[in-house]
Image: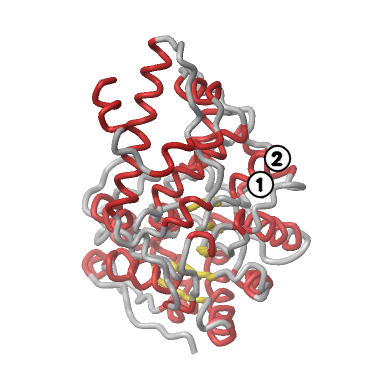
């Protein structure tokens, strides 16, 4: 193994010479560690060299990667406890991002996005990231769509940033100001001052676990995970920022859409209220919570979101879009490709692989994103009694008409009909 590494060293890449020189007298563990690092670097180098479209400058500009690590930090990186200091954890992530972005197709003017290189998108380097937001409500397909966005390379995922508000819909004051400010701060990678949000996290780790790139770092240094002095610079490494919001109604997003410093793109994700309420029945946090279990509240929100969607589609035609969960599920590749074009994102092979592996079989529990996508949205036809469906349809008639959902006429009709009609935002 050592001999192989040494032979490959003769064909070293240009930046190899910048690596810190190890002392001549080093133990077997140190040599093994150095050779392992060699192989890691060669693998990354191979990806960079063989990619015809890779820009070398962003890889070098993305920061102080291995070149700046001390030999002590290299040894710590190979140790079982991964006891790196904060700057080394951040340095590792710079290298991982550079690897993920190898060969990436930058918009370069497509989708009204001018970015041509990584430095155009990385906040740490003065760039503006592409910020993609999903607005919806509980059990409307956002976990699946949020994970689709997170399958994109070098994405930082703000998962349900209002989780600490509990099972409540924010429709106005007194909650709206604090909620909107929290979203703005997170999109700017500014965790300073978000005490309530960060205090909630350690006992509710799923606030961060869905952000797999962050959680990998948290597992190496748990003591840093909830501290702004780590989260601020770590977040600012990422060229893509995604967020799913299930507790804030669409009307309140207009303030963020109007903020030129954010330049966000917002997709409203809508689901048939019969499917949403059927899915909520399986969640132990929903019963007894009026904002979750009451059909009238859900469908009042759908009506309000429809009105807001009409306004936003006219005011921000390039930065607002509405999509139904059922349409996404029936044609996942087509609809995700259209949505990624809207967000200005590449329909990357990693995203296509995620769709291939997550849309064909049912695996896992009620929160799993492995679903037969063509049947998942329509389980309510078998799982709800017709009496339950009639109750929902009575409360939701205006909302269903606006969003193009057809009523079930009787129990036999319910089990076999196609509930999808047409809708327009006019």
Q: In the picture shown, does residue 425 fall above or below 242?
A: below
Q: In the picture shown, does residue 81 fall above or below 111?
A: above
* Number of numbered markers: 2
Q: Quadrant of residue 34?
A: top left
For the residues marked 1 and 2, what is the alpha-carbon distance in whole angstroms?
A: 6 Å
**Residue 365 shows in this picture:** no
Marks 1 and 2 close (CB-CB < 8 Å): yes
**Residue 230 shows in this picture:** yes
Q: Which residue is mark 1?
A: 232
In-front residue for pair 25/309: 25
Image check: 319 left or right of 56?
right
- Please provide percent x and percent y for residue 33: 40, 21
Image check: 348 left or right of 133?
left
The outermost residue toward the bottom is: 426
Helix, strand or loop status at disc 1: helix
In-front residue for pair 401/6: 6
Q: Which residue is mark 2?
A: 229
């Amino acid at each position: 193994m050592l001999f192989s590494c040494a032979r490959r060293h003769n064909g070293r890449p240009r930046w190899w010479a910048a690596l810190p020189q190890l002392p001549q007298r080093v133990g077997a563990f140190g040599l093994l560690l150095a050779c392992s690092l060699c192989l890691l670097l060669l693998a990354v180098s191979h990806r960079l060299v063989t990619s015809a479209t890779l820009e070398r400058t962003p890889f070098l500009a993305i920061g102080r990667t291995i070149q700046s690590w001390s030999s002590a930090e290299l040894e710590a990186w190979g140790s079982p406890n991964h006891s790196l200091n904060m700057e080394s954890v951040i340095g590792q992530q710079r290298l991982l991002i550079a690897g993920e972005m190898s060969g990436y197709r930058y918009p370069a003017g497509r989708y009204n996005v001018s970015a041509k290189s990584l430095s155009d998108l990385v906040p740490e380097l003065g760039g503006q990231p592409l910020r993609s937001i999903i607005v919806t409500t509980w059990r409307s397909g956002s976990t699946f769509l949020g994970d689709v966005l997170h399958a994109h390379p070098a994405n930082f995922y703000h998962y349900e940033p209002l989780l600490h508000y509990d099972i409540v819909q924010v429709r106005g004051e007194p909650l709206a100001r604090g909620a909107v400010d929290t979203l703005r701060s997170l999109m700017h990678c500014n965790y300073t001052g978000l005490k309530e949000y960060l205090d909630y996290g350690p006992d509710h780790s799923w606030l961060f676990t869905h952000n797999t790139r962050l959680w990998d770092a948290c597992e190496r240094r748990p003591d840093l995970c909830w501290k702004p002095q780590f989260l601020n610079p770590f977040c600012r490494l990422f060229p893509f920022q995604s967020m799913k919001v299930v507790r804030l109604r669409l009307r309140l997003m207009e303030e963020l859409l109007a903020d030129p410093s954010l330049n966000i793109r917002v997709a409203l994700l809508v689901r048939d209220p019969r499917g949403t309420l059927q899915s909520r029945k399986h969640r132990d946090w929903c019963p007894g919570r009026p904002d979750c279990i009451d059909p009238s509240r859900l469908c009042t929100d759908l009506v309000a979101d429809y009105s807001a969607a009409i306004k936003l589609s006219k005011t921000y035609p390039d930065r607002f879009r509405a999509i139904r969960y059922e349409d996404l599920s029936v044609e996942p590749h087509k609809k995700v490709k259209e949505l990624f074009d809207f967000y200005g994102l590449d329909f990357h092979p990693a995203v296509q692989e995620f769709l291939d592996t997550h849309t064909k079989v049912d695996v896992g529990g009620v929160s799993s994103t492995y679903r037969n996508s063509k049947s998942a949205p329509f389980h309510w036809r078998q799982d709800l009694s017709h009496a339950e469906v009639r109750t929902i349809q009575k409360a939701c008639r205006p909302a269903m008409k606006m969003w193009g959902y057809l009523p079930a006429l009787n129990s036999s009709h319910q089990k076999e009909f196609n509930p999808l009609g047409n809708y327009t935002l006019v």
